[in-house]
Structure formats: structure tokens, C-alpha cells
Amino acid sequence: MADAGASMTLATISLIGFALLAGFYLTTLNALWTLISVTVTAVLVSQLLRKLRRRDALTERRVCVLVLGDIGRSPRMQYHALSLSKHGYSVTFVGFPDENPSVCLFPVGPRVVSYVTKVILQSLQLLLVLLKTDVQSHILMQNPPGLPSIVVTWLVCGLRGSRFIIDWHNYGYTIMALSHGPDHPIVRLAQWYEQLFGRLSSHNLCVTNAMKEDLQNNWNIRATTLYDKPPAIFKETSVDLKHQLFMRLAKTIPQFRFCGERPGDETERTAFSCRDPSDFSVTLTSGRPALLISSTSWTDYEGFVEAGASLPSLVCVITGKGPQKDHYRKLIDTLRFAHVKICTPWLEAEDYPVLLGSADLGVCLHKSSSGLDLPMKVVDMFGCCLPVCAIHFYCLHELVKHEENGLIFKDSEELSGQLKSLLWDFPDCEDEGKLGQFRRNLRASGGQRWDQNWDQNVLPLLTAP
């Protein structure tokens, strides 16, 4: 139905274009042909608008969730789609299935030409995709990336009578400034574009109160703060589930394997846990290493242990993917630490929250390009009651409370000192020191989960007249 409607729409647009061209040529002949051309064009335009805005009984229950990027790397938009579905909305999820959008570029010529070509082709591609869908009551779009999706989405919403919601995760121009510099013409153009067309949305969501204030004060855009909250799958992991995960990872990752297994010993062991064959009970071993989730330099920590500090060995797990993963994996392979082991496992989606719930400490190196968004990885960690050490930037205090649910550091030296203080005498003092206190504070604070947060802040926007 939608494809047929889109074909008719494209045919009508073609006829309008033909009528305009014919009118331009025929107006040089006489006034009669001018009148005929204007009349035909007006009729075709009215038919097009009527076709584009054709609504049915289900229109108000249809919402399009739009990401002009990799859907798999947009968990917040995935959560939007799930929440909409739970409330009975029919969701159309538009985005790319991976990091490399299938938009052809010309490999020759200046970079600006390739960039302009990409924007034009993506605009046409997105326009056709949105026109192929049934009429939606709302289009909920992630920004960034907003070029060219903001203007294309605004145009489609205007043509079809849909309401336009932008979810501001960050500013696209600040991300571009990291590689081009803040004064580059293309960065300034991107800033002007976001500021101008961002005002045209019906509603706006944003990830922090700091961003809400910035949008209002500098761009005159009113937004509702929707903090990232962990879904219910992020929670503390039971000892038995920890052991099951460790056993699976030990099959392919040496850092999770138990060393020193004795012949005839039927005890099921990993580097962190063991299962007693007599009663199948699982315990965490007393001399286990500390399990950290993140990526950083561990040279200073190695020095502390070599100097005789009462610190455990570390197993550092670096999760996620990215274009530089292979580069850093090669660097990691050159390191020769005796007390710090680093691995970069590929995790199934269902194993990631279990791993977070099994870890002892998280380290976050996220630095916002705008200083106005928050690291979603820390949100997930807190959902699992996992304390963190996070690098400082403006507005991080909206999530990480220093000396309450974690620690904030400004450089590698400060981080090294924090690791030393948190992991001293681990695991014997795991529940007594700061690490245990932070975990207890996270358990006590509880906090909203995504579903309650979404119902409170987003659902009213969808049901408002």
C-alpha cells in the first residue's frame, strides 16, 4: 500500500515538474497558455497535498523513529521504539544497518564536492524513504547527525501533517569541530543549519538540563529533559550467572581461564569463580583479579603492584567497536604487563549487561564535544550498581556524584591514585572500603528505569493535541 502510494506521489511530482516547465515555455506565447499552465499546476499540487496527507483510523497510532546512522549504535532510539510499541504504537524504524551508509560518493575531486554530493544523495534517499511510509502522527528524529535529516524531516512533516520531534543527543557542529576546528566554514555552516532548522520542530527532547538551558538561552529552542535511564535488563548479576558468563568467555579469552588446574580435579573453575562438584554451589575465589570495564593506560597501576602495594591483578575488558579498534588492539598486543591483562571480547547483546553486573569497577573516558551530553555507558553501569571512575567534563555532575556513586578524575595520574585507593586489599575489603560504599549507595538510590522515565516525559508529548 505504501509503495503504491509512493509511486503515485512520485508520478504526481513528475507531472507538476512537467507542468511548470511547460508553463515556463508556453508563457512566452500568450496569456491563455499562462492561465492553463497555472491552473494545471495548482490542481496537481492540491492533489499531491491531499494524497500526502491522506489519513486513516490508524494514523494517530503510527510513529516513525529516525536515525541517519547506525541503528545498532543508537540504543536510546531503540529504547524509544520499544516504549512506543509497548504503548500500542506502530513503529517504523528508519536508519542504516551498519556504520557505512550505502550512499555512493564520487572518489575524485575536492572533499567539499564529495561532501555536498553525499548530502544531496542522502537528502533524496531519505525523502523517498519517508514518502514511502504510511502517514505518521509523529516523526521522532535523533540529532546528531542532523545534516540533512532535520530539513528533510521537517519538509516531510509539513507535507504530510505529521508532528516533528527532535531528540538532541549532542550538537553535530561540535563533533565536526573536533576534526575541522571551530572556525572552519563548514563547521559554522553546520551550526547555523542546526540553529535555524532546529527551531522548526514541534517538540524537542534533550539529554541533560545543561543542554536544555543552552538550547533555550542560545537558540531559543524549548526542550524537555529526558535523562538516559537503564532498562530493566541492566541489573546486578547473581554469582551463578557470573560463573556461567565467565565459563563462556573462558573458551575464547585466555584472561578468563583458571591457571594451575590439577589433574583429577573436577571443580569447574575460571579466573574469578568456581563451582563445587559436590553441591554445585558457586563462589567467587578469594584471590581473584579485579574485573574492570573500560580502556585506559595501566602503566602506573603496574608500577604500584611491582612496588609491593596490596593490590590485585587486573583484568581490563574493553567493549564496543569502532574504526580504530584494530589499531588499539595492535598497541595492546605490544604491552607486556605482569599484573594487568587487557582483552577486547566480542559480546552477544544479551551478555553485555551480564558482564557489567559481574564487574568490580567501571572506568569511563567519554569526553563530550559540546560538554552537554552524558555517557550512556555510565548509565548502564549504574543500572548494574557498578561504581565508576569517570573523566571530568562540564555537566558530568548530573550523573556521577563524586565520592557518592563514583569518582571523577582529570588526568591519568589522578585516575591511578583512585584505582589504588579503591582496590586496596581487594577482594578482602571489597564490602568495607569505598568501592563497597559506592555500590551500596547505588543500590539504595535505585532510581527510575527507562520505562517510567519515558512514560513521564515523552508519552504526554505524543498524546497532546
Image: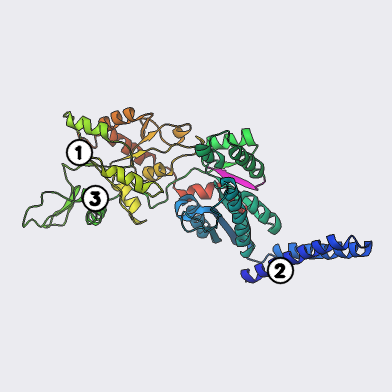
Q: Which mark is residue 339?
A: 1
Relative image position of residue 254 (x, y in whole percent): 21, 51
Q: Could you tell me the amino acid type at mark 3?
A: Val
- Mark 1 or mark 3: which is in front? 1
Task: State the image coordinates of residue 195 (x, y, percent, origin top left).
Answer: 64, 40
Pointer 3 residue: 239
Q: Using the image, determine if residue 282 lies above or below residue 58.
A: above
Looking at the image, which is closer to me, 251 or 381? 251
Q: Are marks 1 and 3 in contact (CB under 8 Å)?
A: no
Identify the residue at image location x=19%, y=49%: 273
Residue 338 x/y as whole percent:
18, 39
Give SS at disc 3: helix
Residue at the right extreme of this rendering: 31
Asked if disc 2 and disc 3 are in contact, CB closer than 8 Å, the reply is no
Q: Is residue 393 visible?
A: yes
- Residue 202 among magenta residues: yes
Q: Which residues are magenta?
A: 200-206
